[in-house]
Image (cartoon, rainbow, N blue to C red):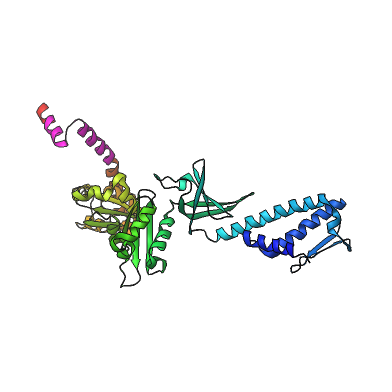
Amino acid sequence: MNQELVRIVDNIARDKNIDRESIFADLESAMVSATRKYYGKAEIDVQVHIDRTTGDIVAFKEGVQIDIKQLGRIPAQTAKQVMIQKIKADERQSVYDEFVERKGEIISGTVVRYEGGSVIVNLNSRAEAVLPKTEQISGQSHHVGERIRGMILDVRDMTSAVKIILSRTHPEFIRRLFELEVPEVAEGIIEIKALAREAGYRTKLAVISNDNKVDAVGACVGVRGSRIKNIVDELGGEKIDIVRWNESSQELIANALMPAKCSQVALCFELGGATVVVPEDQLSLAIGKHGQNVRLAARLTDWDIDILTPEEYNLEVEKLSTGLKNVEGLSPTFVDKLIALGIISVLDLAEIGAEPLVKEIGISPELAAQVIKTAEELAKKQPADAAVTIAQSLMGKTPAKTEADSQAQQ
């Protein structure tokens, strides 16, 4: 009996998470290779069997039993090299199978070193992961020995090792953090319907509760902000806005632009755009620093959002109304119908084309074509008008001042 061999196989199987039968098969294959090399014939018929219970080894060459222990040192070295290669391949496959099933999960590990800006994270005794520079949160730094959490973004079976790629910038990382910190999210009571993120700066989530007794926003924030604080601390101070999901796109857009308050939301389904009117004192809040608030709101709602003050909105409507007044055959309510379709400016009208006017408003194709032609002509003039306005402002003149100057010169 060779119980020592059985014990070694069991230890390797346990430590490296490799199937016990695979190790025995690798041993038999290694011994076959060593025997063929000893006799110098690759095509020779060699069979080796290891008893899985006793560890006894039985070998046959061309149907004749041989004592494999008598082959000598060189075949033993050959068997050793083959065995090492096969066990490494089995271990690599075991690591790959384990982590490929865990893609999208959050995993923690210890920072062991840096390699060209990438952080190498030790996950366990068998595997290391890579946190690339592009997947690290801007402004955060990590030191050796630090415990770090990341989402398994990808698992690749390379030639020599399994490459596990982590991410801390992916939007799904936020979702997984909420599942860890908010039990209601993990249980499905609260659902994260949409998510938009600019890693390191700001994230917006739209949430809904499937239980009338549970407040979605309140549960995510926690008592005195305890739950959201843990997530913000994990992200190094990244701001997180939690808004209520609504099936109504108008309500959802208004919620998404919070903390700014919206006066009016007009949707243009043909263009996939939304015009949002906000008070003058809410304009900078709605747009956000470097346009961040409106940009994230647009990604969260999947609508192109244009923010206007009441004065800008009225000016666009006035330009639209004035520009179309000379088109014969249009009813007095035509502009009101355009506004109801979310078409606020001549630029929108020029882009939308004639077909929606025929289908939605009910005018003739000929009249619709004339309206679009007029809108396109007006749209071409707008860049020139804007350039004149900018030039006048640079010279310190308003349009009113320019007209007065002209009259004085005459």
Q: Quadrant of the C terminus?
A: top left
Residue 396: % across, % down: 17, 31
In depth, the one of 304 and 166 nearer the eye is 166
Q: Nearer the viewer, residue 305 or 8?
A: 8
Residue span colored magenta:
381-405
Q: Quadrant of residue 93?
A: bottom right
Indicate the position of residue 47 as horizontal and vertical percent values: 83, 62
- Reply yes or no: does residue 397 show up in magenta: yes
Residue drawn at 60 percent across, 57 percent down: 95
Is any atom of residue 287 visible in this view? yes
Q: In the image, 248: left or right of 186?
A: left
Q: Is residue 108 magenta?
A: no
Q: Residue at x 57, y 60 (%)?
A: 98
Residue 23 placement: quadrant: bottom right
Residue 292, image x and y in percent?
32, 48
Reply above or below: 48 against 137: below
Is residue 151 shown above or below 209? Answer: above
Q: Residue 20 vs residue 257: left or right?
A: right
**Is residue 402 placed above or below 162 in the rendered structure?**
above
